[in-house]
Image (tube, rainbow, N blue to C red):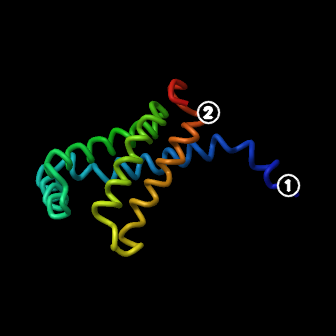
Amino acid sequence: MNLQKIFSKYADLSLLFLRIGFGIRLIWGTLDNIISYDRMMEFADFLGANGFPFPITSAFASVYLQFAAGICWVLGVWVRESALVMVANFVIAILMVHIGDSYINTAPAIHLLTISFFLLCYGGGKFVVSKASN
């Protein structure tokens, strides 16, 4: 039985599942900060405590860029462009917050960095709204 032959025809569908799953994760993970100014300020305080310059601006930028990237991934628009922004976002998060942290605390940032790099390299696949960044 040749598994590659059987399952390779589903490659674009699996890419769609990855985009939707991780896109929803980005949306869900930032929605509380978008809905609640107090939660956004808590995030800004967290960034300030970890040495980020302009923590309020950094908080708003990170949250809204992640939220926008999630929407892009789910819809299949500007997949590579938004993935590039997310690679930068999560490299910065790992370097500024998670160096020396436990794996379990760092894992979400590692996973989102990994999928971001994957989407940057492979694009959104066949099931996208816009083929421009594919």
Question: Which quarter shows the N terminus?
Answer: bottom right
Which residue was labeled with disc 1?
A: 2
Which residue was labeled with disc 2?
A: 126
Q: Mark 2 to mark 1: distance in Å?
A: 23 Å
Q: Position of residue 17 (x, y in %)?
A: 56, 47
| Residue projecting furthest to the right | 1
Residue density around tag 2, few if under 14, some if 14–19, many if 20 or more, within 10 Å: some
Amino acid marked by disc 2: Lys
Residue beneath the point at 46% across and 31% down: 77
Circle 2 SS class: loop
Amino acid marked by disc 1: Asn
Horizontal side of residue 96 vs 51, given as left or right: right
Residue beneath the point at 35% across and 60% down: 94
Q: Is residue 122 above or below residue 41?
A: above
Closer to the chain start, of discs 2 and 1, is 1
Horizontal side of residue 98 vs 131, given as left or right: left
Residue beneath the point at 46% across and 50% down: 22
